């Protein structure tokens, strides 16, 4: 088994096509097929199933690729760090639940590197995709929250994928709403106060488990609830329908505008904000800097 074969297998899985992978690797399709066939024979497993529609990864193949991606990623990190003969590009990717403060931290990071070459990516998306992006090496970090309700389930999911949750800071639960909302001037809000207003929740797609919810208290009975896919729609619903969502209370007027407010919810529950990463893999310099910026958002 060679590093080159691992690179080949990861590229095939990404493109789901022998022909596309061969083209991107600048080798012939027969040479690529031969290299993978030799790898499968050596390991005595079938990594890919070839059919007229393309490539299907087997169950054994998925397990193998989880390790292959780690080795390929570490190889790339070594090249980036020690190959002084090539022009280096600062690379960093982060995925996150719908947190404006995490997006703002990303913007701060990019601003710091405005005089340098860089290749950055940010994905504000569903919880399952945040986890998948880190698992599949699409992102170095994933920003999520845990609480007493979801911690055990999330930790189990992460452990199965060889990932870990790293705590950053905790915060109280707030009700995020338009500054024109009838409850916006209250010092504290209860669930009884919220009964007549629609609760806004981010859609989690096929992985619509309570444990993947981005809002606290997913088991709470809401008389009215509206699902949305993105933060812009959520803000429109707050303004147009007097809706609300539950959040960390960290407001970013630079991104969302000054027409919104966060009122404390009458509860003792806490949100633990943190990031997920691959186990036993150090953060890049950009990853470390991003986390340092995030820590500044801790509410005192």
Image (tube, rainbow, N blue to C red):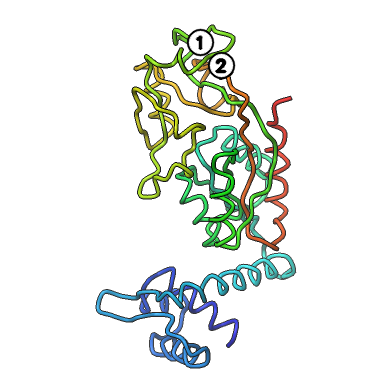
Report helix, strand or loop for mark 1. loop
Left or right for 287, reference 179: right
The residue at which mark 1 appears reads as 184
* Residue 119 point in image, percent of width and height: 58, 53
Residue 200 horizontal/vertical position (percent)? 40, 27
Count of number-bearing discs: 2
Image height check: is 173 above or below 157?
Answer: above
Q: Residue at x 43, y 24 (%)?
A: 235
Residue under label 2, please give it.
Answer: 263
Q: CA distance from mark 1 to mark 2?
A: 7 Å
Quarter where residue 115 is shown: top right
Task: Residue at 28%, 80% (x, y): give it.
Answer: 51
Image spot of residue 54 (x, y percent) = 31, 75
The N terminus: image quadrant: bottom right
Q: Nearer the viewer, residue 257 or 88?
A: 257
Quadrant of the image containing the C terminus: top right
Front residue of this view, candidates 121 and 169 = 169
88 vs 47, left or right, is right
Q: Quadrant of residue 171?
A: top right
Residue at x-position 46% and y-position 50%: 128
- Estimate how packed mark 2 is, as few (under 14), some (14 to 19) or many (20 or more) residues with alpha carbons within 10 Å: many
Query: Do the residues bearing badges 1 and 2 touch, measured as CB atoms within 8 Å?
Result: yes
Name the mark on residue 207.
none
């Amino acid at each position: 088994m060679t590093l080159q074969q691992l690179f080949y297998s990861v590229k095939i899985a990404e493109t789901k096509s022998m022909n596309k992978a061969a083209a991107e690797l600048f080798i012939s399709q027969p040479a690529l097929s031969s290299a993978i066939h030799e790898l499968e024979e050596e390991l005595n497993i079938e990594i890919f199933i070839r059919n007229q529609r393309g490539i299907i990864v087997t169950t054994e193949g998925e397990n193998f690729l989880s390790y292959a991606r780690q080795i390929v990623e570490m190889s790339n990190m070594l090249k980036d760090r020690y190959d002084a003969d090539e022009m280096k590009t600062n690379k960093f990717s982060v995925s996150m639940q719908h947190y404006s403060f995490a997006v703002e931290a990303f913007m701060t990071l990019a601003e710091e590197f405005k005089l340098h070459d860089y290749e950055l990516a940010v994905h504000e998306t569903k919880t399952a995709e945040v986890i998948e992006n880190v698992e599949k090496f699409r992102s170095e970090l994933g920003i999520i929250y845990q609480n007493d309700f979801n911690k055990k389930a999330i930790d189990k999911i992460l452990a199965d994928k060889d990932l870990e949750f790293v705590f950053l800071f905790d915060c109280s639960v707030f009700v995020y709403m338009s500054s024109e909302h009838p409850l916006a001037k209250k010092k504290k809000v209860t669930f009884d106060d919220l009964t007549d207003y629609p609760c806004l929740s981010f859609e989690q797609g096929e992985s619509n488990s309570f444990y993947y919810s981005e809002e606290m208290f997913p088991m709470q009975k809401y008389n009215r609830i509206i699902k949305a896919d993105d933060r812009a729609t959520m803000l429109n619903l707050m303004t147009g329908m007097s809706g609300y969502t539950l959040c960390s209370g960290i407001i970013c007027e630079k991104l969302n505008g000054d027409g919104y407010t966060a009122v404390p919810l009458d509860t003792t529950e806490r949100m633990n904000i943190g990031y997920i990463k691959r186990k036993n893999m150090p953060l890049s310099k950009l990853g470390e800097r991003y986390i340092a910026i995030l820590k500044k958002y801790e509410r005192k």
